[in-house]
């Protein structure tokens, strides 16, 4: 993998990923914009700094496992994976098309590098806990990263998996909650309040790290710290802005499951291109 430490370079990558997501979703005419765009910084740091993997040998046994539990944000993963060399950028255009490897929800048998099939919320974490336990039993030292939506943990199943992970002291498991305060029906605190989320995880015997999930430096530091913590699984509560850097999308639950039309695509790309110039000038 390509390990990038330069902040500016990482910021530019995240911006490119956001542009790719906009292009892909507009072409597909459907998909989940807000969550995917909001997680661009997280995926940038994971794929270009934090995780160990080999995009030319996706099955390499020592790789870190990235398990995406809220599968609907997979466009951000595809955009990062194509940049990391798993498949050509051209293929991004096939998102959600008939017969594609880039399904609207991830299909692990379709695309090498995708660890789990997802779509039904709440399940990826159970799989991730199983992988982490197996790694411990086999004395493997890779990490298991499990990314989850905040609305996703309205489901009961994750809490069973969290108890299981704590019981088994799975300190090789790093759960990241995309705390963007939106879900399909609106604001998370109105639909099903989660706060105080940090206290919930502490009481479930997790180490808890809270950070700004749109701040590259905080993400770099947070993941490095998470890798060193012992005896308990780790939960990173990553506060993000859904639709980040696209003015008409930021913070809006209506963009949870909607794709931009052609006009909205142009507007978004103008904003992201301006931001690119700004980052270059920093
Ligand atoms: C078991 C299950 N129930 C319902 C859905 C429909 N659904 C898809 S995404 C979503 C909202 C999830 O919220 P969150 O995890 O916060 O994602 P975000 O809106 O932030 O992208 C729902 C209810 C589903 N995919 N699986
Ligand atoms: Mg959410």
Image (spheres, rainbow, N blue to C red):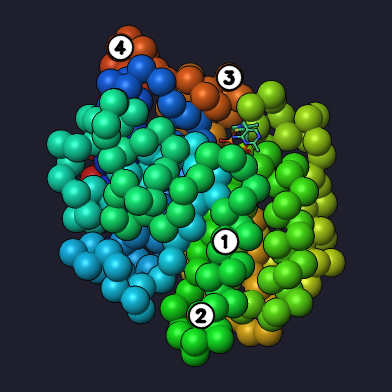
Residue 229's disc number:
none
| 128 left or right of 103 in image | right
Question: Quarter containing ligand 1?
Answer: top right
The image position of residue 175, as x and y in percent, is: 60, 62
Q: Which residue is mark 3?
A: 254
In 3D space, how far apart are the residues under numbered discs 4 and 1 (Cα atoms)? 38 Å
Residue 211 visible somewhere in the drawing? no
In 3D space, how far apart are the residues under numbered discs 3 and 4 (Cα atoms)? 18 Å
The image position of residue 13, as x and y in percent, is: 28, 49
Tell me where residue 267 sits by quadrant: top left
Compared to residue 127, the image places residue 99 above or below, namely above
In 3D space, how far apart are the residues under numbered discs 3 and 1 (Cα atoms)? 30 Å
In 3D space, how far apart are the residues under numbered discs 2 and 1 (Cα atoms)? 12 Å
Q: Which sits earlier in the primary sequence, circle 2 or circle 1?
A: 1
In 3D space, how far apart are the residues under numbered discs 3 and 2 (Cα atoms)? 40 Å
Q: Which residue is mark 1?
A: 127
Mark 3 or mark 1, whichever is nearer to me? 1
| 40 left or right of 221 in image | left
The image position of residue 264, as x and y in percent, is: 37, 14
Q: Which residue is mark 2?
A: 135
Mark 2 neighbour class, 10 Å CA radius: few under 14, some 14 to 19, many 20 or more: some
Q: SS at mark 3?
A: helix
From this viewpoint, which residue is outermost toward the bottom? 139
Residue at image x 70%, y 62%? Answer: 161
Tell me where residue 194 sits by quadrant: top right
Q: How many marks?
A: 4
Mark 4 or mark 1, whichever is nearer to me? 1
Tell me where residue 142 sits by quadrant: bottom left
| 36 left or right of 86 in image | right
In 3D space, how far apart are the residues under numbered discs 4 and 2 (Cα atoms)? 46 Å
Q: Which residue is mark 4?
A: 262
Mark 3 neighbour class, 10 Å CA radius: few under 14, some 14 to 19, many 20 or more: some
């Amino acid at each position: 993998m390509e390990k990038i430490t330069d902040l500016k370079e990482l910021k530019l990558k995240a911006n490119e990923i956001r542009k790719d997501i906009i292009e892909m979703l507009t072409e597909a005419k459907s998909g989940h914009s807000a969550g995917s765009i909001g997680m661009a910084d997280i995926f940038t740091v994971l794929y270009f700094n934090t995780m160990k993997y080999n995009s030319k040998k996706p099955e390499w046994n020592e790789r870190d496992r990235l398990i995406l539990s809220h599968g609907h944000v997979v466009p951000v993963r595809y955009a990062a994976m194509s940049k990391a060399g798993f498949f050509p950028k051209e293929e991004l255009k096939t998102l959600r098309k008939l017969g594609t490897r880039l399904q609207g929800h991830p299909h692990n048998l379709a695309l090498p590098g995708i660890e789990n099939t997802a779509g039904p919320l709440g399940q990826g974490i159970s799989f991730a806990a199983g992988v982490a336990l197996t790694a411990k039993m086999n004395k493997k030292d890779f990490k298991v990263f499990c990314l989850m939506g905040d609305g996703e943990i309205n489901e009961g199943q994750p809490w069973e998996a969290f108890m299981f992970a704590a019981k088994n002291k799975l300190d090789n498991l790093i759960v990241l909650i995309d705390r963007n305060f939106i879900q399909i029906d609106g604001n998370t605190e109105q639909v099903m309040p989660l706060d105080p989320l940090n206290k919930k995880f502490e009481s479930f015997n997790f180490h808890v790290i809270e950070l700004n999930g749109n701040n590259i430096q905080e993400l770099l530091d947070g993941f490095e710290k998470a890798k060193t913590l012992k005896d308990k699984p780790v939960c990173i509560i990553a506060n993000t802005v859904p639709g980040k850097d696209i003015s008409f999308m930021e913070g809006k639950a209506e963009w949870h499951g909607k794709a931009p039309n052609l006009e909205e695509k142009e507007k978004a790309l103008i904003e992201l291109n301006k931001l690119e110039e700004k980052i270059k000038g920093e």
